[in-house]
Structure formats: C-alpha cells, structure tokens
Image (tube, helix red, strand yellow):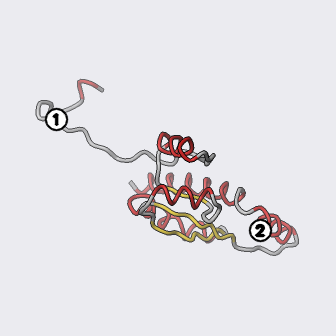
C-alpha cells in the first residue's frame, strides 16, 4: 500500500510541477531568470481539492514537493462549480476533485476551457453481491 501511495504521489508531483510551469507566466518567467543566476525561489501553487481523498493526497506529498521548491497552498472545496470558476479566473492555479466527464460538461455549460493535466488516480470501489461469494470465475 505504501508503494502505491509513493507512485501516486510521484504522479501527482509531476502533474503539479507541470501546473507550476503553466501558472502565472510573469512570476514563472522572473523565477526562471533568478534560477539561472544560481538563486532558487520557491513556487507556491494555490490548489483547491475535495477533502477526501484529494486533499489528503496533496497533504501527503506536500513535504516532498516543498523539498523540490514547490509549496502547496491547499484549500478544501465544498462547491465544485465555484472552484472551477476560481480556476478559470486564475484565482487558483489548479483544482483536484473531478472526473473528466464532469470537467467536460462544466466547460460546455460555462463556456470555459479548463484542461486536465493528467489522470492521477482511480477512486476505490467495491463489488457487492448477495449471490456471488467470489469473482475468481470471472477473472
């Protein structure tokens, strides 16, 4: 299970680094100039996420990202429509709570063009039956 969390964390870290590169261009450009001079500056990403499991995942990888110079400013979202609008308005750098069909419908309904950076994880789910005791015969 721990190995899975590290893999998931690494994937999310990669996604956030990509998001950092796509963030506020003026800040990123000046930070890149400073790093060429040998100075390293921390990048802060404002990201909103649903509490479970998304914010938990972000909180899990935040210390590792901070070692890499990426600080996460995480807020918990309660309103997905507002969160997407804040992202579209560039008040948030990213959000982490939705699946692709929801994002596509929101873009269509609101005439926006938010994009998915990468797929990160699949929500856990269970299979329940009153008739079957095992799925071995189907696997």
Q: Which mark is residue 129?
A: 1
Q: How far apart, in angstroms, are the residues tagged by discs 1 and 2?
A: 54 Å
Looking at the image, is 48 positioned above or below residue 101? Answer: below
Location of mark 2 (residue): 27
- Asked if residue 41 lies left or right of residue 122, the reply is right
The furthest residue to the left: 130
Check disc 1 and report its element: helix, strand or loop: loop
Quadrant in the rendering for residue 85: bottom right
For disc 1, the neighbor class at 10 Å (few under 14, some 14 to 19, many from 20) is few
Say which residue appears at 56% left-offset and 47% top-offset. 110
Where does the image place residue 105, in percent across and percent down from the top left? 50, 41
Q: Quadrant of residue 139?
A: top left
Query: Viewed as shown, does residue 9 lie left or right of 2?
Result: right
Numbered disc in front, either 1 or 2: 2
Q: Position of residue 53 (x, y in %)?
A: 40, 58
Q: Quadrant of residue 65?
A: bottom right
What residue appears at the point 61 percent right and 58 percent down from the top-left corner?
16
Q: Quadrant of the N terminus?
A: bottom left
Q: Residue furthest top?
A: 137
Residue depicted at 23% across the width and 24% down the height: 137
Seen from the viewer's position, the closer of residues 139 and 127 is: 127
User: Could you tell me which residue is drawn at 56 percent across and 71 percent down?
Assistant: 73
Residue 15 versus residue 6: which sits nearer the camera? 15
Q: Is residue 88 above or below residue 104?
A: below
Point out which mark residue 97 bears.
none
Which one is earlier in the sequence, the residue at label 1 or at label 2?
2
Task: Give whichever of 96, 16 is nearer the camera.
Answer: 96
Residue 94, position in %: x, y?
59, 58
Q: Secondary structure at mark 2?
A: helix
Q: Are marks 1 and 2 in contact (CB under 8 Å)?
A: no
């Amino acid at each position: 299970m721990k190995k899975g969390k590290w893999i998931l964390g690494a994937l999310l870290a990669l996604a956030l680094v990509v998001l950092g590169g796509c963030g506020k261009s003026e800040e990123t450009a000046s930070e890149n100039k400073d790093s060429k001079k040998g100075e390293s500056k921390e990048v802060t990403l404002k990201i909103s996420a649903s509490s479970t499991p998304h914010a938990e995942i972000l909180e899990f990888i935040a210390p590792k990202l901070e070692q890499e110079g990426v600080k996460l400013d995480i807020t918990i979202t309660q309103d997905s429509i507002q969160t997407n609008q804040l992202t579209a308005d560039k008040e948030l750098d990213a959000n982490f709570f939705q699946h692709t069909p929801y994002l596509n419908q929101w873009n269509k309904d609101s005439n926006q063009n938010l994009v998915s950076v990468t797929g990160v994880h699949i929500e856990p789910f269970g299979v329940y039956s009153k008739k079957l005791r095992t799925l071995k015969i189907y696997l």
